[in-house]
C-alpha cells in the first residue's frame, strides 16, 4: 500500500480521532502538516493499522 496525500487528507477529514492525532503530532513534534500526515499514515494506516481498511476504501471511490 502506498501513501497518497489526497487520500490521507480525506481520511483525516472524515475521522475526528485522526484529526486529533494529527494536531497532536504537529504540536508534539513541531511538524508541518504534510510530514505529520505521513507520520500518521505510517502509525495508523500502513502495515495493518487501525484505519487501513478505511484508507483502502477511499481508493475504491
Image: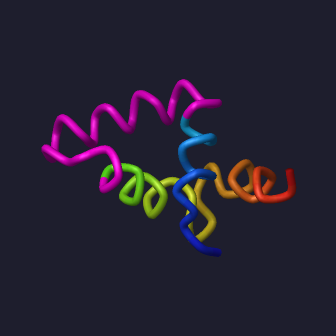
Determine whether 37 is above or below 47 in the image: above
Q: Quadrant of the N terminus?
A: bottom right
Determine whether 8 is above or below 21 in the image: below
Residue 48 in the image: state x and y as whole percent.
63, 66
Determine whether 5 is above or below 11 in the image: below
Q: In this rendering, would 29 be left or right of 51?
A: left
Residue shown at the point (41%, 51%) measured from the top left: 37
Residue shown at the point (73%, 48%) measured from the top left: 54
- Judging from the image, the colouring scheme is rainbow
Residue that extends furthest to the top in the rendered view of this protein:
16
Q: In this rendering, would 30 be left or right of 53?
A: left
Read off the magenta span: 13-35
Residue 9 in the image: state x and y as whole percent.
54, 43
Snapshot quadrant of residue 2: bottom right
Q: In this rendering, would 34 be left or right of 44?
A: left
Magenta part mainly helix, strand or loop?
A: helix
Residue 25 in the image: state x and y as whole percent.
27, 42
Residue 24 in the image: state x and y as whole percent.
28, 34
Amino acid at each position: 500500500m502506498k501513501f497518497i496525500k489526497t487520500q490521507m487528507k480525506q481520511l483525516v477529514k472524515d475521522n475526528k480521532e485522526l484529526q486529533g492525532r494529527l494536531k497532536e503530532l504537529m504540536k508534539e513534534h513541531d511538524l508541518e502538516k504534510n510530514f505529520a500526515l505521513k507520520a500518521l499514515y505510517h502509525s495508523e494506516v500502513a502495515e495493518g493499522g487501525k484505519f487501513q481498511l478505511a484508507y483502502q476504501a477511499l481508493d475504491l471511490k
